[in-house]
Image (cartoon, grey):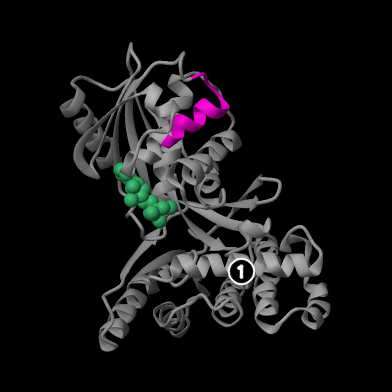
Amino acid sequence: MTVGTERVGALFAQTYGGEPAGLWRAPGRVNLIGEHTDYNEGFVLPFAIDRATTVALSPRDDRVVRLVSTFDDRVVESDLGRVASRDFDGWAAYPLGVAWAFGERAVDLSRVHGFELAIDSDVPVGAGLSSSAAIEMAVAVALDEVWGTGLDRTALARIGQRAENIAVGAPTGIMDQAASVFGEADAAVFLDCRSIAVEQVPLGFDAAGLVLLVVDTRVEHSHATGGYRDRRDACERGARELGVTALRDVTVDDLPGAEQVLDDIVFRRVRHVVTEDARVQESVAALKAGDLAAFGRLMYASHDSMRDDFEISVPELDAVVEAARAAGAIGARMTGGGFGGCAIALLPGGDAAGLADRVLRDFADRGWTAPVPFTVVPSEGARALR
Ligand code: ADP
Ligand code: MG
């Protein structure tokens, strides 16, 4: 048993007494490439990481629902009637939002049993690794099993997204949930955000002696939400003015024509999305061909596009990417929505500690908050533990 399963088992026993009926686990994720492409119905390439949320769950004989998390000490008491009417708040909105979404899509909440749930996670919250998808998908695989709904992984991902969009109220795509359920060891999840078709793409980092270093800059900009909204609006406007359903339908060859009709800012937003979609597809081809150097160049190009065309980088993210370049990383880029958060670098395993030190020194020299560097390993997706 790993530390996570011992901890969640202990929390379950201490809160409810006895052993849980089962344990389930779902990971967070890192996006390798494909930023701000999801809501433009394009492509993304995340992978599931070796940090996960573990849940212990037992069904009850009645309709009561009880929840506890290592997140705080409070035991949340509810019942399936309140879940069905979306009556919950705080962190409980994530697990109970998933139960609510099952009610909408897969079960009659007036006919299933309540449950006792304990939650533990080693996915840091708000660090850009999607602790939210990890908790949603761990609860989703658990409820799917105890309620006997037998949903496929795409349906589970949609339930997680629905919980996040409606129950929590965060307007996110399906990337995080898809990465968390479809992840495999040493592979990325190539997701078509229009069709929700998924293909696992072997990464081969380990065999090539490469590691993926994440640097959490700890920068959290107050205008991140407004900036996200603004970029979405610009993309919608670009699609409308180009007469397409979504920017997914614009190709790199269409860009010179688009430049003639769009204003400069909208054009640059469109160019980022269109070239980023192309970079994701080229990345998949490069990875399938085992050409990690080509993939690394696409990572750098993605960063340049986010910095110059989409304008969502910040000096701290640029500094990590420049330090990675100087340290000989084969690729590096900011990852996530931008305006702060994490950057990633792909580099020889022996160089990761050196880059982490270099970034810590750079940030200290500039008087910035100390960043948090750590490596992540492409790992398997949501599953039951036995
Ligand atoms: P992230 O980038 O980590 O996904 P979000 O703001 O989307 O950040 O989701 C974080 C929220 O998810 C937390 O504030 C909390 O409400 C919920 N959450 C994440 N992990 C846990 C956990 N282990 N226990 C309870 N709630 C959690
Ligand atoms: Mg999240």
- How many dots with numbers? 1
Residue corresponding to mark 1: 295
Side (left or right) of 273 relative to 57: right
Q: Quadrant of residue 250?
A: bottom right
In magenta stretch: residue 286: no
Q: Nearer the viewer, residue 347 or 10?
A: 10
Rendering coords of residue 267 (x, y %): 70, 78
Can I make out residue 176 in this image? yes
Rendering coords of residue 17 (x, y %): 18, 21
In the displayed structure, would residue 160 be above or below residue 352?
A: above
Q: Quadrant of residue 5?
A: top left
- Dominant SS of magenta comes to helix
In the displayed structure, would residue 75 be above or below residue 40?
A: above
User: Please, what is the three-letter code of the amino acid marked with disc 1?
Assistant: Phe
Side (left or right) of 121 relative to 167: left
In the displayed structure, would residue 103 be above or below residue 270?
A: above
For the point 68% across and 55% down, the residue is: 41
For the point 44% across and 16% down, the residue is: 112
Rendering coords of residue 156 (x, y %): 54, 35
Name the image quarter holding the C terminus: top left
For the point 43% across and 77% down, the residue is: 317
Rendering coords of residue 144 (x, y %): 48, 25
For the point 72% across and 64% down, the residue is: 247
What's drawn in magenta, residue-wise?
97-108
